[in-house]
Amino acid sequence: MRSNSGIAGWIKNSFIDFPGTVSTVLFFSGCNLACPYCHNPAIVQGRSGQSVLLQEVLDFLSKRKGMIEGVVLSGGEPTIHETIVETANEIRSFGYKIKLDTNGMLPKKIQEIKPDYLALDVKTTPENYSAVLKATYTNVHERLVESISIVKAMKENAEIRITLAPKIVNDKVIEDIGAMIEGVKKAYLQPLQTNVEILDPVFSELEGISQGEVQCYRGSLQKFVEKCEIRYSKISIV
């Protein structure tokens, strides 16, 4: 059993992170992006001070069959870890479903993990990823398109998430994202949370996107996807 799983945080019981499924949530350290509004900066920067053994998780899961149904692989960015596919397979061998939260920069890893449910975060338009999110990839557009195609193929078992952050999302960005995700079943707009620690504290001081703008963005996206909703409920933060 591997001693270093990359798991830097763990919420043992969640009713909100895996649609329709009672789950346990694993937060993997590090990320291949640096979104200024990230609400798990300690995890992303590797300063959480925690390290969870996979064996500890598996022991927990072996005792929770019938009470917990799924495991969420979140972060940070789970797909950057070389052992993530092996980790997913070990968890699945216990009979649990897997949900993957990812930024989609590593679509091949998504395919290898074969999640039962996929949540893909589309941050902004591809050309903005380098300047705004510090992406080091030269082919962000191709990577996103490939990941979005997986979401489309998974239909009801996948979703697109768009965080509504000032200076990063605007009318044009939403229209451009809409064109990219056309045909997706479910998209969720998530207004930026500023009541928690975020990677760039400056974003906590910015004026948020108004309710009126949020509704306009929803109207724009509804032209491209089957369902677009605004998700105000708080997601789990380790």
Image: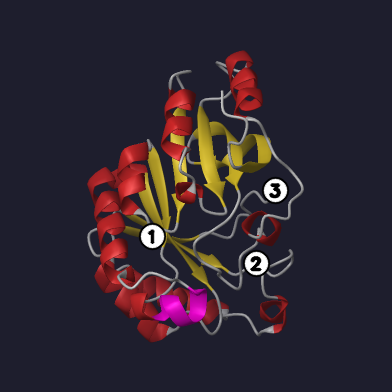
**For the point 47% across and 24% down, which residue is it?**
90
Mark 1: give few (<14), some (14-19) or many (20+) Cα within 10 Å.
many
The answer to whether residue 203 is above or below residue 154 is below
Residue 193, numbered label: 2
What SS does tag 2 mark?
A: loop
- Split into 4 quadrants, where in the image is the N terminus? top right
Mark 3: give few (<14), some (14-19) or many (20+) Cα within 10 Å.
some
Label 3 to label 1: alpha-carbon separation: 23 Å
**For the point 45% across and 69% down, which residue is it?**
123
Instruction: Indicate which disc, 2 or 1, sits on the residue closer to the N terminus.
Output: 1
Q: Residue under circle 1? A: 105
How many labels, in total? 3
What SS does tag 3 mark?
A: loop
Instruction: Indicate which disc, 3 or 2, sits on the residue closer to the N terminus.
Output: 2
Task: From the top left corner, tell me how far across and down residue 104 is, in percent.
Answer: 38, 57
Magenta-colored stretch includes residue 65: no
Q: Which residues are magenta?
A: 128-134
* Circles 3 and 1: CB atoms closer than 8 Å: no
Q: Residue under circle 3? A: 238
Between residue 83 and residue 99, name the one nearer to us. Answer: 83
Magenta-colored stretch includes residue 132: yes
Between residue 81 and residue 227, name the one nearer to us. Answer: 81
Taking the image as shown, residue 112 lies to the left or right of residue 238, namely left
Judge whether residue 125 can be spotted in this image. Answer: yes
Label 2 to label 1: alpha-carbon separation: 23 Å
In the rendered structure, which amino acid carries the disc numbered 3?
Val
Task: From the top left corner, tell me how far across and down residue 125 is, in percent.
Answer: 37, 76
Judge whether residue 224 can be spotted in this image. Answer: no
